[in-house]
Image (cartoon, rainbow, N blue to C red):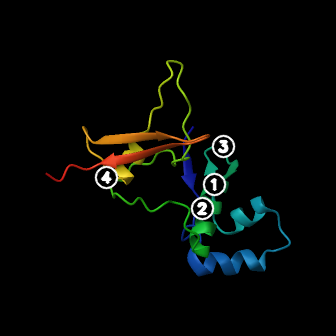
Amino acid sequence: MTKKQKQGNGPLSGQALIDKVKQLEDLSREEKAKECGYYTINEDGSERISMMKFLNALIDAEGVELDSKNQNGNGRGGRNASYRISVQSNGNLLIGSTYTKQMELNPGDEFEISLGRKHIHLKQITDYE
């Protein structure tokens, strides 16, 4: 069964969407989405309201930026750094690539380890000879 977009100029966006939603304050979210053009009509005549498209258009119209600005520009997402690590089952501590990239470390860089009561300090050894 294929769907077709409702007839008309398409769904509202931008300030027109914001204004229309404010006019329809007494309606439910689904009714607002339909009134703003965010629905399709199936071949059997039934309607399907596109809530995600409606809500995303409303967020965009309000100027809310949900996507993070990736600093390295490669467009890849991923987890955020938690700045916490756990001791692995073999007793090792693994410092992830997120931290080594932030510190601009390279393979082979060496550190001096100093142990405190409840902390570990890593001091990078620089060789200026």
Residue visible at 57% across and 76% down in the picture: 14
Q: Where 107 falls versus 25 (above or below)?
A: above
Residue that mark 1 sits on: 52
Number of the label disc, if any, that sits on residue 44:
3
Mark 3 or mark 1: whose residue is earlier in sequence: 3
Number of the label disc, if any, that sits on residue 104:
4
Residue that mark 2 sits on: 56
Q: CA distance from mark 3 to mark 1?
A: 23 Å
Q: In this orientation, which residue lies closer to the viewer: 65 or 93?
A: 93
Q: Within 10 angstroms of label 1, few (less than 14), some, or many (20 or more) residues?
A: few
Q: CA distance from mark 2 to mark 3?
A: 27 Å
Q: Does residue 50 appear in this view?
A: no
Q: Contact (CB < 8 A) between labels 1 and 2? A: yes
Q: CA distance from mark 3 to mark 4?
A: 60 Å
Q: In this orientation, which residue lies closer to the viewer: 118 or 11?
A: 118
Q: Secondary structure at mark 3?
A: loop
Q: Amino acid at mark 4?
A: Glu
